């Protein structure tokens, strides 16, 4: 049986990925230090004999580069690196703004440690990068050849620059050490196992609408995002990992259906029959004005494209939050 290590496996996307891998017959080692992940996300997986949870930090001693000098050796065939805080919202305790050093380290030292682990195991590697590496983009949609427009030292840089470093070290291991690694740039994703307090726009708006509390639109709400349902995202990640010919490739995975944030607020308000008002709050520093993935490369290399439309995904996500 083939073994897959999922770093960040108790997080939102990571836990959905662990479930899919177990359903596909793999044995799964889920590693998470739970600073932004949550054990409740993997509650239904723990009883599976093919699932192992290790509460550890991938920058810590168990993952240090030479395991024979005191660390733990993991025998794995595949390594997904999804470990990182990912929410930019400073009001959330889970935000990378509130975990700046951890965010920088998990994407730099953590990526280095996992690449060494992959090298030693001859394992196939996938790094979860982000649409944030495009910063506040000057072109739209963004394709993989765009270098981005990133503030190198603003509050958001702890994530953006860390992901950019992560991409760089992954490609260095491909070139220098012939590691079979690929990079997926994840665009905005939503769905079940999202943390209600992670401060992301979809979780905030749905929870505010359900509670008939004011829906907080930052800025004028004219900024755009494109929202991918988590099942589509997990399918894209698996295809990027398991499809031949993806070594050294950088691939956008996201849903190209673009919405303004004010439209999203109104859609969610209507779908939840909410009495919430819409209030306007200050736009965070360096908040990207547009974001929309060009997914032609994913279509060509992976025969992937999202199947779940926004309305359908929102129905499922509203149900999930109502049942929490
Ligand atoms: N946003 C908002 N209200 C909220 C949370 C977020 O208007 O309660 C906006 C945020 O300023 C950004 C967009 O929604 O323009 C998406 O934010 P999110 O934190 O989900 O992810 P991002 O794409 O910024 O990483």
Image: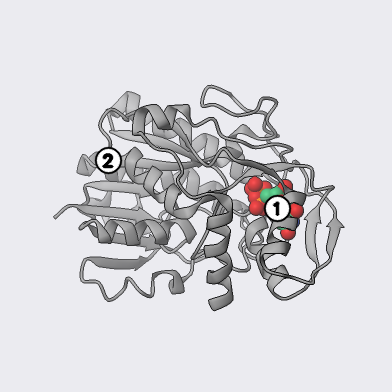
Q: Nearer the viewer, residue 271 or 149?
A: 271
**Quarter the N terminus occupies:** bottom left
Residue pushed farthest left?
1
- Location of residue 266 by image quarter: bottom right
- Location of residue 171 by image quarter: top left
Asked if 39 appears above or below 198 in the picture, the reply is below
- Assess mark 1: CB under 8 A from ligand 1? yes
Q: Residue at x 35, y 48 (%)?
A: 80
Counting from the top left corner in percent of width and height, residue 101 is at 59, 52
Q: Residue at x 65, y 28 (%)?
A: 140
Q: Give left or right: position of 286 versus 15.
A: right
Q: Residue at x 79, y 61 (%)?
A: 216
- Assess mark 2: CB under 8 A from ligand 1? no
Check disc 1 and report the residue beneath it: 264
Asked if 7 appears above or below 272 in the picture, the reply is above
Q: Nearer the viewer, residue 88 or 253?
A: 253
Judged from the image, the secondary structure of the residue bearing numbered disc 2 is: helix
Q: CA distance from mark 1 to mark 2?
A: 34 Å
Q: Give left or right: position of 300 versus 267.
A: left
Check disc 2 and report the residue beneath it: 242
Judged from the image, the secondary structure of the residue bearing numbered disc 1 is: helix
Counting from the top left corner in percent of width and height, residue 94 is at 61, 63
Q: Residue at x 56, y 66 (%)?
A: 195
Visible in this render: residue 108?
yes
Visible in this render: residue 8?
no
Q: Which mark identifies residue 134?
A: none
Asked if 67 appears above or below 239 in the picture, the reply is below
């Amino acid at each position: 049986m083939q073994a897959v290590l999922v770093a960040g496996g108790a997080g939102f996307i990571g836990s959905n990925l662990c479930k899919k891998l177990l359903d596909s017959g793999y044995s799964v080692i889920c590693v998470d230090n739970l600073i932004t992940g949550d054990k409740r996300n993997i509650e239904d997986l723990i009883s599976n004999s093919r699932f192992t949870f290790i509460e550890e930090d991938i920058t810590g001693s168990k993952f240090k580069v030479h395991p024979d000098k005191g660390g733990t050796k993991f025998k794995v065939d595949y390594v997904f690196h999804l470990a990182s805080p990912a929410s930019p919202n400073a009001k959330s305790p889970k935000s990378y703004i509130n975990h700046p050093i951890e965010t920088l380290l998990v994407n730099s030292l953590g990526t280095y440690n996992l690449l060494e682990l992959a090298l030693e195991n001859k394992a196939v590697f996938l790094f979860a990068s982000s649409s944030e590496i495009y910063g506040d983009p000057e072109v739209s949609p963004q394709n993989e050849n765009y270098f981005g427009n990133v503030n190198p030292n603003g509050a958001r840089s702890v994530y953006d620059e860390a992901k950019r470093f992560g991409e760089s070290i992954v490609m260095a291991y491909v070139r220098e050490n012939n590691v079979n690694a690929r990079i997926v740039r994840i665009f905005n994703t939503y769905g079940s196992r999202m943390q209600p307090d992670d401060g992301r726009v979809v979780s905030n708006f749905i929870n505010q609408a359900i509670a008939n509390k004011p829906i907080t639109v930052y800025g004028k709400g004219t900024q755009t995002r494109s929202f991918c349902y988590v099942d589509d995202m997990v399918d894209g990640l698996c295809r990027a990992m398991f499809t031949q010919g993806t070594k050294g490739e950088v691939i956008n995975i996201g849903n190209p259906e673009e919405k303004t944030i004010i439209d999203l607020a109104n859609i969610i308000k209507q779908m939840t029959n909410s009495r919430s008002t819409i209030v306007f709050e200050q736009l965070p520093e360096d908040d990207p004005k547009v974001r929309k993935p060009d997914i032609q490369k994913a279509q060509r290399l992976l025969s992937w494209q999202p199947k779940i439309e926004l309305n359908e995904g929102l129905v499922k996500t509203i149900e999930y939050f109502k049942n929490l």
